[in-house]
Amino acid sequence: MTNILCIGAGYVGGSTMPILASHCPEHRVVLVDINEKRIAAWQSDQLPIYEPGLDEIVRQTRGKNLFFSTEVNRHIAEADIIFVSVNTPTKMFGKGAGKAADLQYWEKTARQILENSTSSKIVVEKSTLPVRTAEAMERILNSNSNGLHFDVLSNPEFLAEGTAVRDMQNPDRVLIGGRETESGQRAVEALVELYAKWVPRDRIITTNLWSSELSKLVANAFLAQRISSINAISALCEKTEADINEVAYAIGRDERIGRYFLRASVGFGGSCYKKDILNLVYLCEHYGLPEVARYWEQVVVMNEYQEARFASNMVASMFNTIAGKRIALFGAAFKANTNDTRESPALEVCRALLEERADVVITDPHALENARNDLGELAKRVTFEPDPYIAANNAHAIAILTEWSQYTQLDYERIYNSMVKPAFIFDGRNLLDHKKLYQMGFNVHPIGKPPLTRLTTNHRA
Ligand code: NAD
Ligand code: UGA
């Protein structure tokens, strides 16, 4: 039996370790976190994250070979392999503020591992980190004087929220980076063996440490770059009467371009794209590559432009004033099938509308609590309403900001009838049937397509 520990029971630790435990019943997997509330939630029926399919796996493994605990030190002492998936947010102070990764949680964990270890261990970086972080980790860990040896591996996580279970069960690839020493390669082999319990070996890629660390940042940068590219073109479509869906389909049929990640939207959100790109930008600056830094920074600049453009388009379309107007935001999560609202474009749009003194009401099937927390003081000026029909009642406009499938099933005729006229719908996800909405009487503003606007509300005449 191998004792496997994961430090950090957030989105990544919490969705990967139950699956690892389910495929490795002969091993013991413990998830620890300093956040007591989170651990209590993992031990309850109300898990702290919403991720389709995860409840079932946790229920099957919890108490058998999967355990949750706040006793970090005790479990470090017992562990053979330690995954570290603590948060690595953008540093907000000192050198590199606003770009570099804040590694304080990371370094604290390294020191904690060192202080509580009585046997040699494999330590696996699961968090996303700047390239060459493993070197710092190794130096801290191997600074001990009690003869212990630590092998540090990089094993970045590529799962996406909302599909975490599927992504972890059936990954495109697993990436493991290690030192090219004998002990480093033994550690790599040990981790390969764990994954090989359910991942075909030809999907397990092994590289040197630095390639692995860097590949994670680059994968996110490429994905976000595609979204910013299509969003940039959506702005041009709106000026030229080209249709972004048709353009995306036409270019995506070229296999060299591919059809994925070409959905134009109000912008990309989530805890990682912006943070990881800014981290890449900082690394390029640090290594004296300002042109490379500026190139990648533009992906984030374009995303901010898209979010701001969406909000200002709403104001301009609604006669240049939304002060005191009720506006219903459909969706708070940064994408469908998650309750995560970190960096959600919905909240960015909400902030912009509040600036204009709109009366904002947000509805979402799973993310209202996180939205309220993320908005902080501003939450006092917002109404949170789980029922979309009530949210839309008496509203001047609806903005679709998360692509929840339930929003395609609503009775928009009923919604239209309950709204102030002229009624507007801004579809930030191109989710709905725009022609149908227009026929009902809505003024429809999609992304990257000409708006369907009415000069009069007397549409049925
Ligand atoms: P998260 O904030 O949801 O979870 C991190 C957890 O670590 C928190 O619960 C926090 O309390 C805990 N923690 C911090 N310091 C600790 C310590 N010293 N001891 C014990 N617990 C500690 O973050 P996340 O979304 O799971 O992301 C974790 C890492 O994985 C980040 O580096 C992120 O970039 C990366 N990542 C995230 C995703 C994703 O979809 N969220 C995907 C791939 C990679
Ligand atoms: C992303 C990556 O997809 C994962 O591989 C990676 O592990 C993870 O970041 C991470 O490192 O945290 P995630 O942010 O959970 O996963 O979700 P995505 O599906 O990538 O969506 C991110 C944002 O882009 C969402 O706001 C989504 O709505 C938006 N998006 C995505 C678009 O606007 N258009 C698209 O075509 C695709």
Image (spheres, rainbow, N blue to C red):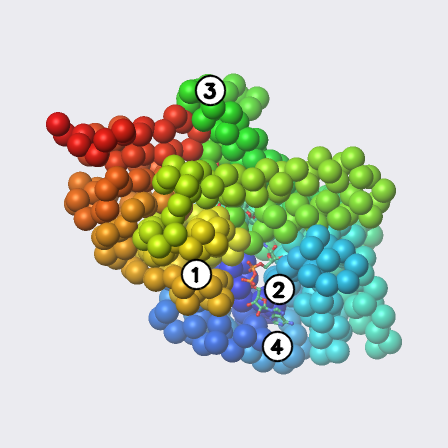
What residue did someone put label 2 on?
86
> Residues at badges 4 and 2 in contact (C-beta under 8 Å)?
no
Say what secondary structure mark 4 lies in: helix
Q: Give the crowd class for mark 1: few <14, some 14-19, many >=20 residues within 10 Å.
A: many
Residue indicated by mark 4 = 72
Res 32 → quadrant:
bottom right
In the rendered image, residue 216, in percent from the top left (x then y), is placed at 65, 46
Label located before the other in sequence (4 or 2): 4
- Image quadrant assignment for residue 287: top right
Q: Secondary structure at mark 3?
A: helix
Q: Does the CB distance between marks 3 and 2 fall below 8 Å?
A: no
Discs 4/2, front? 2
* Quadrant of the snapshot with the C terminus: top left
Task: Please name the amino acid that badge 3 sits on.
Answer: Thr
Residue 116 pos. (x, y %): 71, 78
Q: Position of residue 358 (x, y in %)?
A: 39, 53
Mark 4 neighbour class, 10 Å CA radius: few under 14, some 14 to 19, many 20 or more: many
Secondary structure of residue under mark 1: helix
**Foreground: 175 or 129?**
129
Contact, mark 1 vs mark 2 (Cβ under 8 Å): no
Q: Is mark 2 within 8 Å of ligand 1?
A: yes
Residue 371 seen from this side: yes
- The response on whether ligand 1 sits within 8 Å of label 4 is yes
Q: Residue drawn at (84%, 77%), measured in percent from left and top?
A: 146
Residue tagged by mark 3?
Answer: 240
**Amino acid of disc 4:** Val
Depth check: 291 or 306 in front?
306
Identity of the residue drawn at 80% across and 45% down: 285
Residue at mark 1: 371
